[in-house]
Amino acid sequence: MLLAFIFAVFSGPRHALDAQQSKPEEYQVKAVYLFNFGKFIEWPQATPKDNLFGVCVLGHDPFGATLDATINGEIIEGKKLVARRIAGIQDAANCRILFISMSEANHVKQILASVERTGVLTVSDMPDFTSSGGMIQFILRENKVRFEVNLSAAEKAGLTFSSQLLKVATTVKRDEQKGVEGQ
Amino acid sequence: MTRLRDSLSRKLTAMNLLVSGGALMLASTALFAYDLVTFRGTLLSGTTIQAQIIAANSVSPLIFNDAKSAEATLSALRTTQHIIYAAVYTLNGEFMAGYWRGQGREPLPLPPFNRESGGFSKFEGEKLDLVQTIDFQGKTVGFVYIRSDLGALSERWRTYGVILLSVLGVSLVAALVLSRIAQRKIARPVLRLAETARQVSREKNYMIRAQLTEDQDEVGLLVESFNDMLHEIQKRDTALQESESQFRVLADSIPQMAWMTDKEGAASWFNRRWYDYTGTTPEEMEGYGWESVHDPEILPKVLATWKNCVRTGQPYEITFPLRGADGNFRLFLTLALPVRDAHGKIVRWFGTNTDVTDQRRSEEALRQTEKLAATGRLAASIAHEINNPLEAVTNLVYLARIQPSNLEKYLKLADQELERIAQITKNTLGFYRDTASPAPVDISEILEEVVALYSRKLNFKRIRLQSEYGDRIVVEGFPGEIRQIFANLLSNAIEAMSEKGRLRIGAKQVHGRGNLTAIPGVRITFLDNGTGIPPERIKKIFEPFYTTKKDVGTGLGLWLTLGLVAKHHGQLRVRSSVRPGRTGTAFSLFLPESQEDSSKDGSGSTTKTEAAS
């Protein structure tokens, strides 16, 4: 009861704290979101024979150890999650979730093209990522980490997004048309 | 009539309303009661389901920290009534999104509970606090907290109330319609019947008939039966009136006076002859008004006898004088019998008064006649009795004259003969010199005297006399009358016998028979072996003018004897046989010892006649 009271008292100032949150905190949230996306997706049957569920970071790693700590012990599709850092797209064979770092912004089109139909979930926080054919793009709104979705890209890859996921997306896009504004 | 109609139709309407309204009330009461009893369970399960739906829809908002999305989910609760507050909390217990019924915007702190149990619910008064965990892939990711109240119940009851009122209204209309129909089909014929019944009883007119109904239902049957009943009553009424008028004519045409009393003995009706004779009016005769025409000296005895009969139900029989309109009393034999109902209970008495004054006078005249006849017979008998000694005296006087030497002897003999004549004369006088009140009578002495009087006749017929009685058998009575009774019975016996007959006379002290059982007295028997009396005649022998000896008898001897026995409150029985070789007649006379405690005048006298074949 006392704990609940404290929560209630400090719930107001929490938003103010969010505004000044440091980069590592932002990526900690993003790391949680990253593997949680996997739980709201129906994965295709044809998947690599790997017993591990790879969560890969392509390019400069903004998460650091946070990612490993976050996904440690988590399981998707009965497989143990494992974090990987890859330097080039050619190493993405064992990846199920691929976070494309801002550092790869210049050749994002080639990267996306190469994994287009491999059933890999593409996530990034670079601007216009969903417009470029990426599936999920982190955005910041009111100092909160939100995301938008390109449903056509996901469908092309054979991934089915749960309505629960689409419900919390800020924007759900289809093809190049202007996406339906989310809630 | 209008008041009646209203009442019956109102009753039908009220009954209809009561039935439909009552059933509805009962059903709704049961429903409300059930709802109230099960409400907590219903509320809990309803709230749980809603919490689970919210929980299922709050997974992704929680995971992706989307308060707006959670709020959107919670806002769906607007359609519910019972939820006051609902909110989604993070795993840490932080408020994330909420819903308030009404104006409130303050998030409630998550109530403390055991997180391991997965959820929690608690009733506080009419409020329910429920916490449901939000689970995702086997892990708890947050909580839903819902607070509910009775809003749902009262809302539902409001709905029920509206339904109930509308159904009640419809039933009321239906009941009114039904009562209209019922009035036409049931009430109206019944009311018509009731009006007919009232008219019949008011006018006492049994010719009226109730109007038949078109329907062949119970009411129709009732009307028909009622008419049948009226018909039957009409028939009986006519018969009763006829019977009544027949009775009146009969009652007024008989020579007797007739009357009726209620079961208590108070007079209710007299025939015309009564009023004509007594010169009274019905008003004067009401109740015990008849007492006024009685002889005041005899009235107490009459009343005592009458009250005794009314109490016991025994037939009333008494003779008393009644004063006529002219102020003279005449003697009436009064008989009355109780009239009983089907259960044997006395409902009234019916009686008659028969004028027996002339009869009594005739009887008295007859008695005088027989007394004169008896005197004549006695005179003849005395003449016979005296004749012998007189002849002897005449002879003795003659002998004395021609044989003076034996004068002394003849005079002595003549003296004896004259003494006999004196004795006979003395005995004869006893018949006529009687006392005015009962006196002690020596039965054996009188028997001796009577036998002596008839000794010549007995000797003449050579009848053997057997006397079986001792000395000093005394009863109270009138000696002359007792002597006459004995003389009659003895002379009858002598006349019935031929030569060498046998006559037995007995007397002994006994108790009476029949209704005189308790009374001590003397029984005197005259037993002869004469011709006997045939059975067909034996019942007539006590009637006046009955005689088998037309040339010598008056036919009044036994009738008079019976009257004398009755005067002494005694009994006279006769038994006779005409069987060849065993013929004979026995008269058995009972005389009570005392004349004092005799209850009724003459009623102690009974005759019993028996004929042995």
Image (spheres, rainbow, N blue to C red):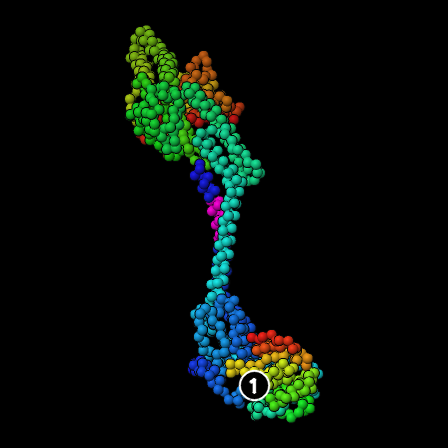
Query: Residue at image x 48%, y 37%?
Result: B191
Query: Is residue B16 in the magenta section?
Result: yes
Specify the quadrant of the image occupied by residue A30. bottom right
Query: Is residue B457 in the magenta section?
Result: no
* Residue range highlighted in magenta: B11-22
User: Depth check: A6 or B561 in front?
Assistant: A6
Query: Residue at image x 55%, y 36%?
Result: B213
Q: Position of residue B488 (x, y in %)?
A: 40, 20
Q: Position of residue A135 (x, y in %)?
A: 63, 81
| Amino acid identity at mark 1 | Lys
> Residue furthest toward the front?
A106
Residue under label 1: A30
The chain containing the residue under callout 1 comes to A
Left-right relation of B425 to A86: left
In the rendered image of this protein, does residue B416 appear above or below residue B147?
Answer: above
Residue B561 visible? The answer is no
Q: Position of residue B205 (x, y in %)?
A: 47, 29
